């Protein structure tokens, strides 16, 4: 009877999600993250960051989520004739040992349908979701919009 209990316990431990590797998110680091504060009535904002893949295999970032917004998507700016437009993208591939800059005017995390006004000086959590289902959670400060430089 004791051998059966021991075997059952070992099986449960081995099957536990805590013992499984996190997958693509294992080799991820985030730097220079921040969320753009918007005027209180603004419905949307964006998060900018650098995603670093320290692993020896490529990763694919396919989404994000945050309690700040009803919808969180990956976006990019694309030229449509003479106009730059934001478009939702399906993912961002990051080669082994490389990084992806999510910055103003380029790829970014779009926060759509803000649930509350963003307060500069506070932080918020964002979860990055990878193609294998693994996740990386990080905190980002909310920073005020900087006025455009005078010409």
Image (cartoon, helix red, strand yellow):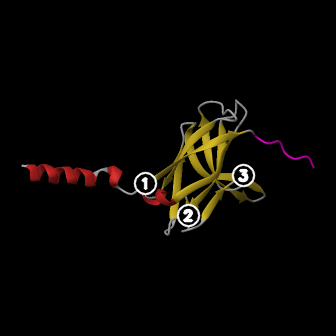
**Residue at horizontal 15%, vertical 54%?**
7
Q: Is residue 88 visible?
A: no
Which image quadrant is residue 125 in? top right
Q: Which mark is residue 26?
A: none
The answer to which quarter of the image holds residue 70 is: top right
User: Which type of secondary structure does the marked residue at label 3 adopt?
Assistant: loop
**151 or 41, which is in the foreground?**
151
What is the CA distance from the residue labelled 2 to the residue labelled 1? 15 Å
Q: Please state if 22 lies on the left or on the right of 77 as rendered.
A: left
Up the image or down, 38 lies above or below 109; here it is above
Identified at 76% across, 55% down, the residue is 83
Q: Position of residue 112 (x, y in %)?
A: 61, 40
Residue 37 against residue 54 in the figure, above or below: above
- Residue 41 position by quadrant: top right
Mark 3, residue position? 104
Residue drawn at 65 percent across, 30 percent down: 117
Is 16 inside the magenta-drawn segment? no
Left or right, 10 with reference to 140: left
Task: State the extent of the magenta-drawn residues as a range.
Answer: 145-151
Q: Mark 2 and 3 residues: CB-CB less than 8 Å, in contact?
A: no
Q: Using the image as rendered, state which of residue 7 and residue 111 is in the foreground.
A: 7
Residue 62: x percent and y percent? 52, 55
- Number of the label disc, if any, that sits on residue 133: 1
Tag 2 residue: 93
């Amino acid at each position: 009877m004791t051998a059966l209990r021991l075997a059952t316990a070992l099986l449960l431990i081995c099957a536990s999600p805590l013992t499984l590797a996190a997958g693509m998110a294992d080799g991820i680091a985030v730097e220079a993250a921040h969320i753009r504060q918007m005027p209180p009535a603004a419905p949307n904002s964006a998060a900018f960051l650098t995603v670093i893949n320290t692993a020896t295999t490529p990763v694919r970032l396919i989404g994000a989520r945050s309690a700040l917004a009803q919808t969180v998507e990956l976006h990019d700016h694309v030229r449509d004739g003479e106009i730059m437009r934001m478009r939702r993208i399906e993912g961002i591939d990051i080669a082994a040992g490389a990084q992806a800059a999510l910055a103003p005017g380029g790829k970014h995390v779009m926060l759509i349908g803000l649930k509350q006004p963003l307060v500069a000086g506070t932080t918020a959590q964002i979860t990055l979701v990878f193609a294998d289902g693994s996740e990386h959670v990080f905190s980002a400060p909310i920073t005020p919009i900087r006025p455009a430089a005078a010409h």
